[in-house]
């Protein structure tokens, strides 16, 4: 049975129980396994990365190698708001530190974080809105490489702006000791984001909008000829994905606490490619695929980084090659093909 | 930035320096772009690991220099090593990518790039290296313009290699087979050309070209395990601007890119040089799309 | 539901692997954790840092280790390679604390890497004593777990600028007519050195004619040098770790650029005087420490004793990076003994109260973790040796200005 088939949005008891179970696991995990809290947070954010990529790449067929651009924008904008509300950002980032002590109390930190997340969504969405008309007309591999260029150029540009720390990066505000474990707060924020993202996308894909996106993927010229609003749909998908990526980026920046322009914010060679790999691993073009892919990827990556330190990128590269060449349909795609075949044989 | 422009205005000889520097490194870009165009035209695969092949060639040269071999000998050695690697990679990975979705080939070659990056970092350390050629510089304009002799040597070698390649493709049987497959694979197959072998040969040849380019580059410019991506992007840009199959265009575009980078690095500041390259890529593609769209509208 | 079953089993495997206990070690050993740059652009100084750490651990253990609650503890260090990359440093800091259960961190090399690891040590309440991160911005964000034994970067070259102002007559100019060219690496250290230099320049009314911020790769200064040929400044200040010093000196010679006063950081760790005595003649070098200074402590003896021991062990002259790294270990030895505890927070509090004389210099941390008690040293390379020219009480030679043309 296809859970994400458009038009079949029934909320039967089976579905409700499944959603409830997922919610329960999500809420309880950091309390049961506190040692894995930050990895779990990272996983939730990766799920959002993968889902957002898939909206544009899998559902719409515009494989972007530069979605990391929005992650970085969200990360920096949130940090700027978090610091900028109370201190001069340039002074905060100046190598000599300006002589003042930049300390944040509980309310400052929380308000900053909240407004920062909102600003991240807006900024990322706006960036997508402005870039969309320019870039979404480009097709196929040219689009892929173009977005790669965007992602990496953004990182290099950010590294050249001293106001946000330049090449030496920017620290997000140090949470006050009175707040206790900020990691837990970030976890629940990430959980909420992941759930919101999944729900939003599930709904979007069940509407006509989802059909338009798939039509663009299947044959854009025909869709245009049929009179579908392709241009608007493309930009809309791009903006929605960007907004989610921005917020996820903002949370990621606060999780890692140190924003390096080329390695954390606009990390084209790492996070940028990982989000594609996750969607591909799980199965692009499906709702469940990116989620499954993200979980599998995160586990694999942690294993590689722990046990193959020093060769972990080689292992990852090999994984990318194997997945790209032999499993381009991903796990969910593969499982579906299997179940379809077993259905067909009498 | 204004300050830098003023300096250029005050000392125009500096402009000559930047121009010459740009053209000299343009030759290396042209060679790498030539290889990429070859693979793209024949197998329809964009090799995202192109820059890593170049870096690897450079490291082979570093290795040779450390073991006391004469400088120019490193070039054929690097070409040979990379040819073998290219052949191996073709058999292992690339052969599965022929005829498939472009996205798959980009992702798979990206995977190869990542593997090569870390392997190079493990074998040679993560710092950057350069081969000391021991050559001096010529000075013009009262010492204001310095032309490193080794850069001229690299430039000349690239030209020679490029010319040799063109002759190979025009005259030799293998070269003609490659061109035939590029034009029309099915017809070529019908005529008895083994397309699989041609694909493999093309990919390995490209790797060898990159290896030679890298070995040459290492004599004058620093080599770094993670420095490949900017070469890949440059090659891609040059090929996109010149168009597949346009050799003269590749040369001009490469020279133009080299000069543009050189001036941008000076005027905008060295920290923006890489951003300039990638930004230029975006601009080129957007403009190209605009032009194509206008053409598409004509047809309507 | 085969798919979810396989996912669950993979998850279970991963969890069990991750929960497996690591290291810990014997009860008589205190493990300090260190991510240093063994590869990458800081590999050279990463090696110096490691050498300093190792030598100090040996010296401390020879003198009885650390005594806590009547029990004797030896020090040992667990190392990882941060590849000179901040993101890597962050991963390794997490790994040291979470998986290796290390409670005391020794800092990496470089302000950039320390800046990346700061949030991690702060989050887990683990103190970090470092000897290689001098940027002032590390100390203004309210982090309580960082302790730096070295002088901050703003002090590096201020004495050089003062010296130039003092001796302006030798250049035939007034201090306010002196022109300065800056070539600084775009990282926290380089930018902070630049801030300090600019403060000095403003004080004397000098002018900055070139202000280049070089990308961290810093392998080619020809653009800056071309500008220098055009504008002919009096002073060139270079700060780009060893790479910067090496590149500057070799390219100045290769491109035949003559600057009357050359001021750099990191000359001694780049071994300029030893390997390029001609190209580096008369260059001024900022150093955190010099073997001729008259400090001493109970583990190494005097500064000269440390230099001798270092040379015997590693076969080369001790760069100051090794000395300051060794001092970091000594600080831990002292603090652990005073705390009489292995609890990270207690040790952090005793670290904050450190008031220790070491072969490297006096160490006393202010409330932000900076060592306010130790001055910087300025040397000049003469005939392949570093001669101290400032502060006056340790000066062994007169400063030579301008540099003879080569």
Image (cartoon, rainbow, N blue to C red):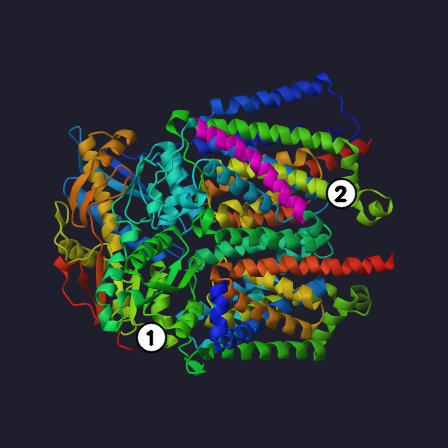
Q: Residue at x 47, y 47 (%)?
A: A164
Give neighbour class at mark 1: few <14, some 14-19, many 20+ (Cα, 10 Å).
many
Residue A45 x %, y %: 56, 35
**A13 or B144, nearer to the observer:** B144
Image spot of residue C150 (x, y percent): 25, 48
Q: Nearer the viewer, residue C114 or C37?
A: C114
Residue at screen point 63% across, 59% down = B281
Q: Main secondary structure of the magenta part?
A: helix
Can residue B70 be seen here? The reply is yes
Residue at the spot x=76%, y=28% of the render?
A1
Q: Is residue A319 left or right of residue A30?
A: right
Provide the residue designation for mark 2. Answer: A232
Q: Position of residue C141 (x, y in %)?
A: 37, 39
- Work out how far the residue at label 2 is from the one at label 1, CA to CA, in angstroms: 61 Å
Q: Residue at x 82, y 67 (%)?
A: B187
User: Which residue, given by chain and number where applicable, does mark 1 sit on?
Assistant: C258
Which of C304 and B241 lies nearest the eye of the viewer?
Answer: B241
Front one among C140 and C221:
C140
Q: Is residue A120 magenta?
A: yes
Q: Are marks 2 and 1 on the same chain?
A: no
* Residue B217, above or below A344: below
Q: Which residues are magenta?
A: A107-131
Q: Quadrant of residue B105?
A: bottom right
Q: Chain of mark 1?
A: C
Q: For mark 2, give the secondary structure.
A: helix
**What x and y, as percent, mark residue B122?**
44, 55
């Amino acid at each position: 049975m296809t859970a994400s088939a458009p038009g079949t949005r029934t909320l039967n008891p089976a579905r409700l129980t499944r959603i409830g179970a997922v919610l329960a696991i999500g809420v309880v995990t950091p309390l049961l396994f506190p040692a894995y809290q930050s990895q779990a947070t990272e996983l939730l954010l990766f799920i959002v990365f993968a889902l957002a990529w898939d909206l544009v790449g899998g559902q719409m067929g515009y494989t972007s190698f530069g979605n990391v651009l929005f992650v970085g924008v969200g990360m920096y904008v949130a940090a700027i708001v978090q610091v900028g509300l109370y201190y001069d950002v340039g002074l905060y980032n100046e190598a000599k530190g300006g002589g003042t002590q930049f300390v944040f109390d509980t309310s400052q930190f929380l308000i900053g974080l909240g407004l920062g997340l909102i600003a991240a969504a807006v900024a990322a969405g706006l960036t997508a809105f402005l870039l969309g008309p320019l870039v979404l007309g480009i097709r196929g591999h040219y689009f892929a490489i173009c977005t790669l260029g965007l992602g990496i150029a953004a990182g290099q540009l950010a590294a050249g702006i001293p106001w946000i720390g330049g090449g030496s990066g920017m620290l997000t505000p140090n949470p006050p000791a009175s707040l206790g474990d900020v990691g837990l707060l970030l976890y629940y924020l990430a959980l909420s984001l992941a759930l919101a993202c999944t729900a939003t996308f599930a709904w979007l894909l069940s509407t006509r909008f989802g059909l338009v996106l798939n039509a663009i993927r299947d044959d854009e010229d025909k869709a245009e000829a049929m009179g579908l609003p392709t241009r608007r749909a493309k930009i809309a998908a791009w903006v929605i994905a960007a907004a989610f990526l921005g917020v996820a980026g903002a949370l990621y920046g606060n999780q890692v606490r140190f924003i390096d322009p080329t390695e954390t914010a606009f990390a084209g060679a790492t996070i940028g490619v990982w989000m594609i790999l996750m969607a591909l691993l799980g199965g692009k073009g499906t709702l469940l695929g990116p989620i499954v892919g993200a979980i599998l990827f995160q586990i694999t990556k942690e294993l590689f980084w722990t046990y193959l330190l020093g060769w972990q990128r080689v292992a990852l590269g090999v994984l990318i090659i194997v997945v790209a060449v032999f499993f381009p349909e991903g796990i969910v795609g593969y499982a579906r093909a299997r179940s379809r075949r077993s259905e067909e044989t009498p | 930035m204004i300050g830098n422009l003023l300096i250029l205005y005050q000392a125009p000889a500096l402009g000559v320096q930047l121009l010459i520097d740009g053209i000299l490194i343009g030759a290396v870009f042209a060679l790498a772009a030539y290889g990429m165009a070859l693979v793209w035209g024949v197998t329809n695969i964009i090799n995202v690991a192109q820059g890593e092949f170049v870096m690897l060639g450079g490291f082979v040269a570093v290795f040779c220099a450390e073991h006391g071999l004469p400088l120019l000998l490193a070039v054929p050695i690097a070409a040979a090593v990379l040819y073998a690697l290219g052949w191996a990679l073709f058999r292992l990975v690339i052969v599965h990518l022929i005829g498939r979705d472009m996205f798959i080939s980009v992702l798979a070659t990206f995977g190869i790039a990542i593997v090569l990056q870390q392997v190079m970092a493990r074998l040679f350390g993560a710092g950057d290296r350069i081969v000391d050629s021991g050559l001096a510089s010529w000075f013009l304009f009262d010492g204001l313009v310095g032309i490193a002799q080794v850069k001229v040597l690299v430039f000349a070698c690239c030209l020679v290699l490029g010319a040799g390649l063109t002759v190979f493709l025009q005259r030799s049987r293998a070269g003609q087979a490659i061109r035939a497959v590029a034009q029309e694979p099915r017809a070529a197959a019908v005529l008895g050309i083994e397309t699989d072998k041609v694909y493999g040969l093309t990919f390995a040849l490209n790797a060898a070209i990159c290896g030679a380019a890298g070995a040459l580059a290492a004599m004058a410019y620093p080599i770094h395990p993670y420095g490949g991506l900017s070469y890949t992007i440059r090659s891609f840009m040059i090929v996109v601007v010149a168009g597949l199959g346009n050799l003269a265009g590749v040369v001009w575009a490469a020279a133009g890119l080299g000069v543009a980078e050189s001036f941008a690095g000076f005027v905008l500041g060295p920290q923006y040089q890489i951003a300039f390259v990638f930004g230029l890529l975006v601009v080129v593609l957007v403009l190209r799309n605009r032009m194509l769209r206008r053409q598409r509208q004509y047809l309507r | 539901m085969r798919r979810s079953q396989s996912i669950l089993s993979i998850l279970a495997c991963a969890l069990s692997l991750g929960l497996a206990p690591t290291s810990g070690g014997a009860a008589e050993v205190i493990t300090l954790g260190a991510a240093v740059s063994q590869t990458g652009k800081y590999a050279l100084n990463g090696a110096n840092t490691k050498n300093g750490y190792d030598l100090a651990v040996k010296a401390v253990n020879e003198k009885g280790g650390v005594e806590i609650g009547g029990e004797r503890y030896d020090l040992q260090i667990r190392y990882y390679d941060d590849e000179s990359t901040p993101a890597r440093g962050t991963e390794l800091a997490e790994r040291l604390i979470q998986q290796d259960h290390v409670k005391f961190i020794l800092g990496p090399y470089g302000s950039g890497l320390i800046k990346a690891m700061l949030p991690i040590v702060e989050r887990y309440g683990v103190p970090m004593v470092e000897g290689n991160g001098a940027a002032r911005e590390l100390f203004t964000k309210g982090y309580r777990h960082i302790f730096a034994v070295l002088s901050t970067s703003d002090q590096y070259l201020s004495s050089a600028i003062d010296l130039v102002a003092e001796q302006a007559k030798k250049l035939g100019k007034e201090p306010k007519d002196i022109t300065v060219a800056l070539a600084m690496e775009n990282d926290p250290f380089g930018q902070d050195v630049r801030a300090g230099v600019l403060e000095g320049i403003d004080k004397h009314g000098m002018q900055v004619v070139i202000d280049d911020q070089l990308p961290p790769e810093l392998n080619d200064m020809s653009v800056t040098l071309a500008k220098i040929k055009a504008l002919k400044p009096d002073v060139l200040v270079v700060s780009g770790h060893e790479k910067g010093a090496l590149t500057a000196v070799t390219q100045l010679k290769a491109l035949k650029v003559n600057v009357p006063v050359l001021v750099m950081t990191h000359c001694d760790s780049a071994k300029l005087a030893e390997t390029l005595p001609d190209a580096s003649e008369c260059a001024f070098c900022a150093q955190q420490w010099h073997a001729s200074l008259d400090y001493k402590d109970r583990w190494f003896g005097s500064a000269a004793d440390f230099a001798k021991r270092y040379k015997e062990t590693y076969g080369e002259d001790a760069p100051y990076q090794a000395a300051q790294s060794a001092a970091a270990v000594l600080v831990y030895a002292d603090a652990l003994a005073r705390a009489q505890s292995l609890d990270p927070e207690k040790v952090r509090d005793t670290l904050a109260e450190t008031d220790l004389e070491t072969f490297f210099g006096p160490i006393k941390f202010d409330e932000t973790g900076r060592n306010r008690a130790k001055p910087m040293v300025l040397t000049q390379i003469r005939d392949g040796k570093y001669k101290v020219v400032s502060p006056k009480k340790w000066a062994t030679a007169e400063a030579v200005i301008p540099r003879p043309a080569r």
